[in-house]
Image (spheres, helix red, strand yellow):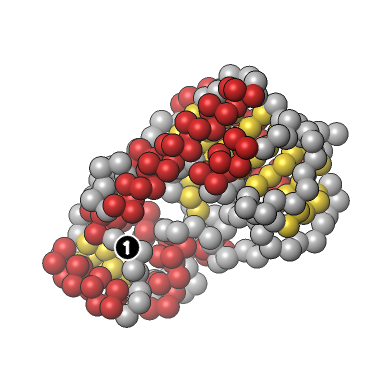
Amino acid sequence: MKTALVFGASGQIGMPLLHRLGERGWRVLAVSRDEHSDAPGRHWLQGEFANMPPLPEAVDAIFSCGPLDAFARWYSESHIDAPRIVAFGSTSAMTKHDSEDEHERDLVRRLLGAEAALFASSEQRGTTATMLRPTLVYGRGRDATLSRIAALARRHGRFPLPRGADGLRQPAHVGDLADAAFAASQSVAARGRAYDLPGGETLPYRDMVKRVLDCLEPPAKLLELPMPLFRLTLRVARSRGIARELTDAAVQRMREDMVFDAAPARRDFGYAPRAFAPTADMFKPVL
């Protein structure tokens, strides 16, 4: 029986990955800061990178579904033997490098630095790493974009967008990302490579949001406002502690295309993401 060590195991991608590994007969060591109950074939380890619990000397694969920079630092200093490493980063490393927001530019630096460090450590240790960069993630109610939109829309019965929010998006479901992680770990062609993982449908930002609003119970209304009125509405919301994470840079990107190519991942490990067909349950946090 093969053994996998999974970081970020209780997160939005980590949980479906645990199920995929279990279905394929793997024994899983799942690391989380919180306490969880064991299940057949799954043993939980409580800890974090700064205070890691005892780990085995060797596993067949390590999966990182949490913060990439923290994982890359830990891996460079660890001594565990694992021939395959699969880690999640983000396409934000590509889309936010010219952002006007210093915090976003810092995120890009950290993501790219962590990718380079992980590949360097892997090569030095004679192992093989694969980097997966998903686009806009959804499916377990824990993402920072669509689930927040759904929560605000449920609370107020509507959600405002600026007119012209037609930048293209490719939302990626957590189940498809979990499948991709396992498939990449088994692929010879994926060794030492990085892949963008877009969802299976490309659609305008406002259409993506409208599908989220339409699937809620009850459905919420989309309000498209002239940009000056939208910015005023946003300022008022921020003053009340609402939507503070929606920066001016994020608003600007609503009009910009963020499209990535799934062909390399499809070719090398059969990546087959679904079209965007959201349901209300996808935006309710799953504990």
Q: Residue type at mark 1: give it.
A: Leu
Q: Which residue is mark 1?
A: 246
Picture quarter containing residue 80?
top right
Horizontal arrangement in the rendering, residue 139 relative to residue 49 (left or right): left
Q: Nearer the viewer, residue 262 or 81?
A: 81
Picture quarter containing residue 272?
top right
Rendered location of residue 242, percent (x, y) = 35, 74
Question: In the rendered image, which quarter contains the C terminus?
Answer: bottom right
Can residue 15 be seen from the camera position used here? no
Rendered location of residue 10, percent (x, y) = 65, 56
Q: How many marks?
A: 1
Rendered location of residue 253, percent (x, y) = 27, 50
115 versus 7 height, above or below: above
Residue at 29 percent of width and 52 percent of height: 102
Q: Nearer the viewer, residue 285 or 272?
A: 285
Residue at 42 percent of width and 58 percent of height: 145
Can residue 121 be seen from the camera position used here? yes
Question: In the rendered image, which quarter contains the N terminus?
Answer: top right
Q: Nearer the viewer, residue 25 or 5?
A: 5
Horizontal arrangement in the rendering, residue 199 relative to residue 282 (left or right): left
Rendered location of residue 184, percent (x, y) = 61, 30
Q: Nearer the viewer, residue 203 or 63?
A: 63
61 versus 8 height, above or below: above
Dot 1 alpha-carbon crowd within 10 angstroms: few under 14, some 14 to 19, many 20 or more: few
Residue at 40 percent of width and 71 percent of height: 153
**What element does badge 1 sit on?**
loop
